[in-house]
Image (cartoon, helix red, strand yellow):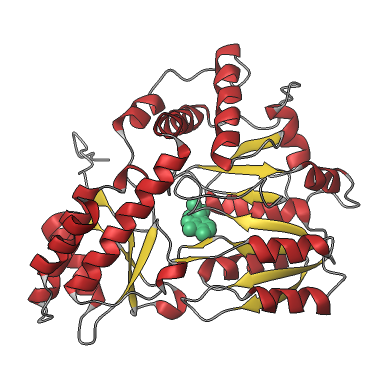
Amino acid sequence: MKLENPRNVPEKLLLGPGPTPVESRVLRALSEPTLGHLDKDFVAIMDETRDLLRYVFQTKNELTVAMSGTGSAGMETACVNMIERGDKVIICTHGVFGTRMVDVAERCGAEVVTVSAPMGKPIDPEDVARAIKDNPDAKVVGIVHAETSTGVLQPLDDIAKAAHDAGMFVLVDAVTSLGGMEVPVDRLGLDMVYSGTQKCLACPPGLAPVTVNPRAVEHIKNRQQKVQSWYLDLTMIMRYWGQERFYHHTAPINMIYGLNEALRIIAEEGLENRWRRHRRNAEALWDGLEALGVKLLVDKEYRLPSLTSIVVPEGVDEAAVRKDLMSQYSVEIGSGLGELKGKILRVGLMGSGSNKENVVFFLAAFGTVLRKQGFGADIGGALEAVEKKLS
Ligand SMILES: *Cc1c(COP(=O)(O)O)cnc(C)c1O
């Protein structure tokens, strides 16, 4: 075997839907000495990580852990633990990730009732209320808080209330919201919420933070059937993250160091400051894009501060735009998924990636690439709009 020597991974600016830029502090933490998974020095880092996770989730939930796996493992954790074969569940789909949740729930043997919204729109709480009324035997309502495939921020207040009034559990996907905006876990009594490390938490992919309230923990403990997945079974995982330190599987030690450091960075900035920063830079990006002359998919009220979807202008080849941004400027952005493939471009401003420099650089690069394709982007106007917003 011939190896290329030395191997050099080039630096690129990650302004897509994730992974997002990782600060050197976090990369350094990943390279700290690997310890045993029951070592007291490692266990102390785990305990602190759990406390920091409670802080970013804004929760007092005892059962707050980082599952070994990416955001999708968080989704599977929620489904396999809360759903038993034959259970009826209501799942809201307004994009690719809601649809994925339906797939996962069906694999758990659930009978799934779906409530949908057109791509780019939030779920209407009235539709959920109707589904709850029509299906009083459903146990769970599942919903995506930040639909990364469309850029829609889903308001949760009314939906959570309707589900709880009917005695149902609420499962929430907060993969692209946690760390970038409020995720109202305790405020709304959300029963199980999961996330991923490579979006607004600004850590490499590999862990899925999950928090479960006492009511859902009781439900899991009282299951009739065993959890379908041995690996993601919270009844065992909670014994490792708790005082017992029961061996289940070897924790991804260095990934926990990385997450710990990423969470420390968040605590140093302060959660509210971080939400405000994401919001301000996103608003500057929106103003800049509008001045540039392009349209956004989502109405302002429901836009995510972490991810913006741009409607591909008539006559513009979106694949060529992404290719040029990468080859000319080393900038990565996302394409449309599912129904929106070819129709939108997705720009993420998450974690340390949410800053004024990136907004300005992206608008200038994007405008230049669009002009090459004959679209008359007003780059000067876009940069002025950013300056106006952020000065
Ligand atoms: C990214 C994402 C996921 C999946 O996470 P992976 O880390 O890719 O497994 C799930 N839900 C949402 C809303 C996401 O944005």
**Residue 78: image location, x then y, percent:** 69, 52
Measuring from the top left, give residue 291's x and y in whole percent. 19, 71
Q: Is residue 219 visible?
A: yes
Whole-percent x, y for residue 85 in the image: 83, 62
Instruction: Tell me: 141 left or right of 156.
Output: right
Up-down: is 259 above or below 288?
Answer: above
From what the image shows, is residue 63 above or below residue 151?
Answer: above
Instruction: Identify the residue at horizontal 72%, vertical 49% (top origin).
Output: 229
Q: Residue at x 20, y 44 (%)?
A: 10
Q: Is residue 285 above or below residue 19?
A: below
Indicate the position of residue 343 as horizontal and vertical percent values: 34, 80
Left or right, 196 with respect to 23, comes to: right
Q: Nearer the viewer, residue 248 or 21?
A: 21
Identify the image quadrant of residue 312.
Answer: bottom left
Residue 36 occupies quadrant = top right
Q: Residue at x 54, y 21 (%)?
A: 45
